[in-house]
Image: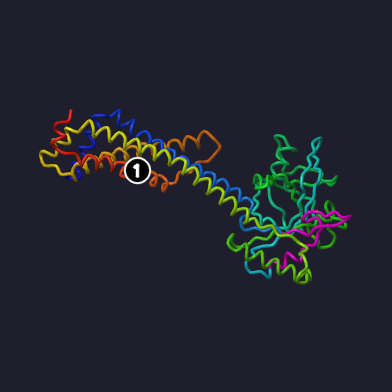
Amino acid sequence: MKTLDAFFDALRSLKSNSLRSVLTTLGIIIGVGAVIIMVSVGNGAKAKINRLIESMGANIMMVMGGSSRGGGVRGGAGSLPTLTEDDAWAIQNEISSVIVAAPSVSGSVQVIKGNMNWATSALGITSEYITAREWKVQNGRFFESSELKRSAKVAILGKTVVDNLFIDQNPVGQTIRVKRVPFLVIGVLAPKGQTGHGMDQDDVVMIPMTTAKKRILGGRKLSGKLVSSIVVKARSAEEVSQTEEQVKELLRQRHRIRPGQNDDFRIRNLAEMVSTRADSSEAMSLLLMAVASISLVVGGIGIMNIMLVSITERTREIGLRMAVGATAGDIRSQFLIEAIVLSLIGGLLGAILGIGGSLAMSAFSEWPAIIDPKSVLLAFGFSAAVGIFFGFYPAHKASLLDPIEALHHE
């Protein structure tokens, strides 16, 4: 019996019992659809995490000052300013893998606009900070170099600050007061959302660093060239670990820290958090796929059971085929092809269900679902493999029937 003839015979046999065929493939349909939906949801979760990571900067390091001590109480990292603007320029100029090193000063302030006020963070920055953090202005403009040099009283607001101070108003061109000092709003930052630790990146007021030191955040704590932190941007995420070691070595030399002494600064490497979140997301995707794959196995068992019932019902047909010259191989091929066709039909319908379900989930919820063609092909191929695996035993059993006993079967 030719394979093509066996294929058409299988289709005719399945068509004659269409309801049973549909019920048989139901497990495969649900399994393939579930695998595709779960993988799509997992890919969407990874994409969402990647966007969050990109907003923070996967190739960025935060260098902060040391820890203060007083009365037996130790402050947290950055509570004692030990970094300077010169440290930032040294990092930028002496380490080849560094694109930019941006010093900044920061502190908590109360911002007032008319009868509205909001407690937020003031960030005194240079033009390098914008490059390092890849901030974009949604409305207005960034600081000009002349404004940075002459300590101009201009400010750029994050979206959270705008939402709490300006209701249905364009803040650009209006004046706010930061610690009773008037500032002209020249821009609004594009929203970045929260960090991995739940910190709102949009709850900020950016002002020139020279202005911040002289009028808002200065004093003895940040006198001279002292800064709160330095943002270091490496050329790529892969070079972050190596760059971190070079930054650490350079700062120890500049701060004259002898071997065995503790660093008077702290470095936070965002790449570690990136790796952890990526691993967690990958593990969750694999778990979801494993759970969904159980449906395929259950569907395969259903196919095997129905094929065994089919063999019992068609015993006389099998005997007649053998009587007119069909070999055991022909009988085995016929029933194996029927099982494979069932699986492929179920796989095709499952793929349609999975793609449609993923698109519907993405359309009616805020959770992204990204369909991966490889996952569709994998699920479809796995359904064919299920048909071969679970269809072989019934097909082999049919091929072992005795023709004479089969013809006499009632």
Q: Amino acid at mark 1?
A: Val
Instruction: Classify residue 295 as left or right of residue 93.
Output: left
Q: Nearer the viewer, residue 351 or 136?
A: 351
Instruction: Classify residue 236 as left or right of residue 213.
Output: left
**Residue at image point 74% right, 55% down:** 125
**Image quadrant occupied by the N terminus:** top left
Residues in magenta, as a range: 63-92
Q: Position of residue 403 (x, y in %)?
A: 14, 38
In this picture, is 2 found above or below 98? above
According to the image, label 1 marks what residue? 386
The quadrant where residue 234 appears: bottom right
Q: Secondary structure at mark 1?
A: helix
Q: Position of residue 379 (x, y in %)?
A: 39, 44
The quadrant where residue 86 appears: bottom right
The quadrant where residue 228 appears: bottom right
**Residue at image point 77% right, 59% down:** 65
The answer to whether residue 131 of the structure is visible from this angle is no
**Image quadrant occupied by the C terminus:** top left
Q: Position of residue 217 (x, y in %)?
A: 83, 53
Instruction: Classify residue 241 as left or right of residue 124.
Output: left
